Amino acid sequence: QVQVVESGGGLVQAGGSLRLSCAASGSIFSINSMGWYRQAPGKQRELVARFTSGGRANFADSVKDRFIIVRDNGKNRAYLQMNRLKPEDTAVYYCNVVLIDAELREYDYWGQGTQVTVSS
C-alpha cells in the first residue's frame, strides 16, 4: 500500500505565498516522478509543476516565474513554493507520484487534494 498526503493549502491574499508539502509512504521501491496538479471548479485537472523521471522540473507557463518545486528524494517528499499568488491560482492542488517496481512497472498514485484559495 502506498499513501500520498498533501498539506499546506489555505486562504491567502493576492500577492502572497503558500508552501504545499507532499509525502509518499508505504511500499515504495522507487519514485519515477513526483509533482503537482490542480483543478479549478468547472475546469480540467492541469499540470502545475513536476519532476520528470530524468530529474528535470517542468512547469505550467502560468506559474513558471512564480512557483518553485523541490524534491527530497531521501524522504519521498516534494514541496511546491507558490509565490506572487493570483486569484486564478485558486484550485484544489493534488500531488501525483509515479512509482516503479523491480520489474519497472509503473504505478500512479494521487493524494486527496488540498484547497488553495487566493482572494483579490
Image: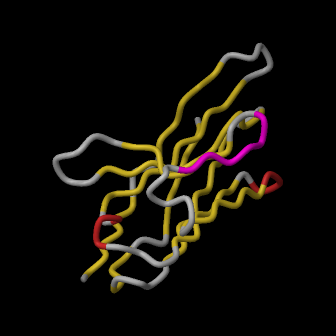
Q: Does residue 27 appear in the picture of this structure?
A: no
Of 94 and 88, the residue lying toward us: 88
- Please state the horizontal and vertical placement of residue 84, each as a whole percent of the image: 47, 78
Picture residue at 63% right of the left edge, 44% below the top: 34
What segment carries the magenta color?
A: 54-59
Query: Is 75 covered by the magenta stretch?
Result: no
Where the C terminus falls, by quadrant? Answer: bottom left
Q: In which quarter of the image is residue 68?
A: bottom right
Of 4 and 114, the residue lying toward us: 114
Q: In this view, does 95 lie to the left or right of 74?
A: left
| Residue that sits furthest to the right in the current view | 74
Q: In which quarter of the image is residue 91?
A: bottom left
- Please state the horizontal and vertical placement of residue 87, each as a whole percent of the image: 29, 72
- Please state the horizontal and vertical placement of residue 94, each as a whole percent of the image: 44, 51
Picture residue at 68% right of the left edge, 16% below the top: 105
Q: Classify 109 as above or below 5.
A: above
- Please state the horizontal and vertical placement of residue 15, each as a whole percent of the image: 41, 84
Q: In this view, does 49 lie to the left or right of 15?
A: right
Q: Classify 26 as above or below 99.
A: below
Where the N terminus falls, by quadrant? Answer: top right
Q: Does residue 83 appear in the picture of this structure?
A: yes
